Image (cartoon, rainbow, N blue to C red):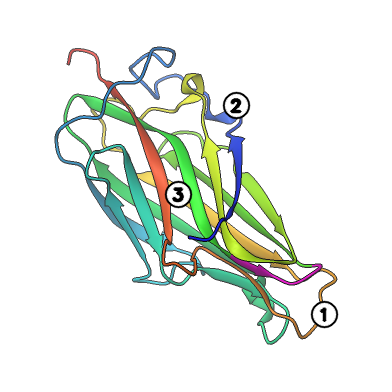
Amino acid sequence: MRKGMTASAALLSALALTTGTASASSTSAVEPPPIGKITLNVLTVNGSGCPAGTAAVAPSKDNTAFTVTYSNYTAQAGGNSKPTDFRKNCQLSLGVHIPQGFTYAIASADYRGFASLAEGASGVERANYYHQGSPQSTPVSHTIKGKVSDNWQFTDSTPVAELVWKPCGEDRNFNINTELRVDKGSSKPDQTSFLSFDSTDGDVRTIYQFAWKKCPGH
């Protein structure tokens, strides 16, 4: 993989625990991942960035993370681009089934892709995620400015004290909202700029890192 651009941002205080969203203390150390099997299913898909059949999800073998893979998620502007091409978005609702006696939160998310932006153009990647029935996290945005043609990666991390845990003993879908935007800015009208959840080396995964805790009584 060619050297990509990296950046990080902590999710804001809107991620702080709210009453009833967790049964475990937010300040104690997280637990090792459970041994049992984790299953994830894409329940609903909405958005111009993820047409039916172009988004998939899978847990890691060691239960420390899960990945979302997109195969047709590109925003572009300039050249022969359509007026609506400058913005693409995707809303995923995932069914997450975890071993009994555990709860989870998302400690960080790694977003990866490819940018081809002409001089004067810019692109924005924006994302947030939340458990069904819990407050949405504050979206975090990252900007890439042209001229550039390279892989990119951004990591959004959450402090341990601000992790939002799935309520113990309850099935809650996990929702992910992502968005890509491209502004042609002062670039030449015939130049096409694009930003994609994709890359030249085939590494198209978005990785969500789990944090684990045992529920009371287990």
Q: Kindly identify which numbered label has been placed on residue 176.
A: 3
Number of the front mark, 1 or 3? 1
Q: Position of residue 61 (x, y in %)?
A: 22, 44
Residue at 82 percent across and 80 percent down: it is 188
Structural distance between the alpha carbons of marks 3 and 2: 18 Å
Which residue has dot 2 on it?
13
Q: Residues within 10 Å of mark 3 (few under 14, many from 20)?
A: some
Name the secondary structure under disc 2: helix
Q: Nearer the viewer, residue 29 or 11?
A: 29
Give the answer, above or below, for where 165 lies relative to 198.
above
Q: Say what amino acid the circle numbered 1 marks.
A: Lys
Number of the front mark, 2 or 1? 1
Q: Position of residue 16 (x, y in %)?
A: 52, 24
- Judge whether residue 42 is colored magenta: no
Structural distance between the alpha carbons of marks 2 and 1: 41 Å
Q: Position of residue 10 (x, y in %)?
A: 59, 33
Name the secondary structure under disc 3: strand
Q: Nearer the viewer, residue 4 or 41?
A: 4
